[in-house]
Amino acid sequence: MKLALIQLHVVPGDPSANIARATEMVRQAAAGKPDLILLPEVWNTGVPADPAVPGADENGAPAALAMRKLAAELGIPIAAGSVADRRGGAVRNTAYVFDRTGSETSRYDKIHLIGLMGEDRIYAPGARPCRFDLPGLPCGLMICYDLRFPELARALALAGARLLLVPAAWPKPRLHPWRTLVQARALENQVFLAAANCAGPSGPYDFFGHSLVADPLGNILAEAGGSEEILFADIDLAACQDVRRTMNLLSDRRPECYQI
């Protein structure tokens, strides 16, 4: 199975430019015949500083809608990263997934909001994990800061996810924790993890790229550089079962002993 990760330079507050560039890069990625395309976090607006979030999607349009149409046109499932999305009177950091027909497979509102970057002033938090299936591909969704909370990745793995998808806007200088957390979440849950990051300066932040794909042993299978790039990686989901046949961390858990 081939994954394509879109490492995008996001122009803050310019959804039209970002949609045009994301569309161009998705079309380029499609030429490599991937089985799934993943975009980064809040790629429609960039990381907003204004709680009003000018340019946010309204109920998944126009940015998420553009990816829905591309998925149907190209016949390739698209995990459309996350977008700033205004729904029900609140702005949310929402990840959308569309199958090869353009149907919405899942929608996930970011649960953990990072106070350091003011997300808790801007977005309404999500409250439910997102575990979903594409044909032959049991997946879970997390967004950026969620990587720092191992409980969420574990819950998704226990629910049967074999591939965790993580759109991110992870800024400099935190490259070491980025790599470490991607590898740890994959290793401790014996799953594949694909994390697509933004790249380049965007408003007050500078994103270092280095999108990653890690295997169930925590090995890095593919890593991007520091600028815009399409990262491809081949994964074999059977590796999850191979690893667990040797040492099954999930079945060796003793949750009845974890209460203090």
Image (cartoon, helix red, strand yellow):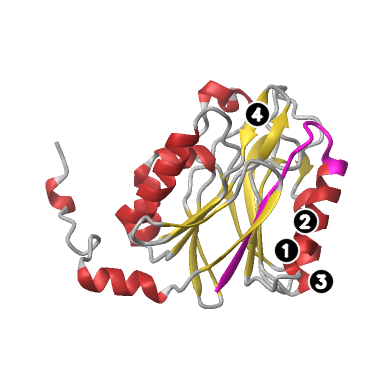
- At label 4, the amino acid type is Asp
Question: Which residue is the site of mark 4?
Answer: 206
CA separation, marks 2 and 1?
6 Å
Q: Mark 1 and mark 2 in contact (Cβ < 8 Å)?
A: yes
Question: Which residue is the site of mark 1?
Answer: 29
Q: Where is residue 112 in the image (x, y as percent from the top left)?
A: 48, 36
Within the image, what quadrant is residue 252 found in? bottom left
Task: For mark 1, give the secondary structure.
Answer: helix
CA separation, marks 3 and 2?
15 Å
* Image quadrant where one finds the C terminus: top left
Question: Which residue is the site of mark 2?
Answer: 25
State which region is magenta: 1-17
Residue 220 is at least partly visible in this image: yes
Q: Residues within 10 Å of mark 4 (few under 14, many from 20)?
A: some
Task: For mark 3, give the secondary structure.
Answer: helix
- At label 3, the amino acid type is Glu
CA separation, marks 4 and 3?
33 Å
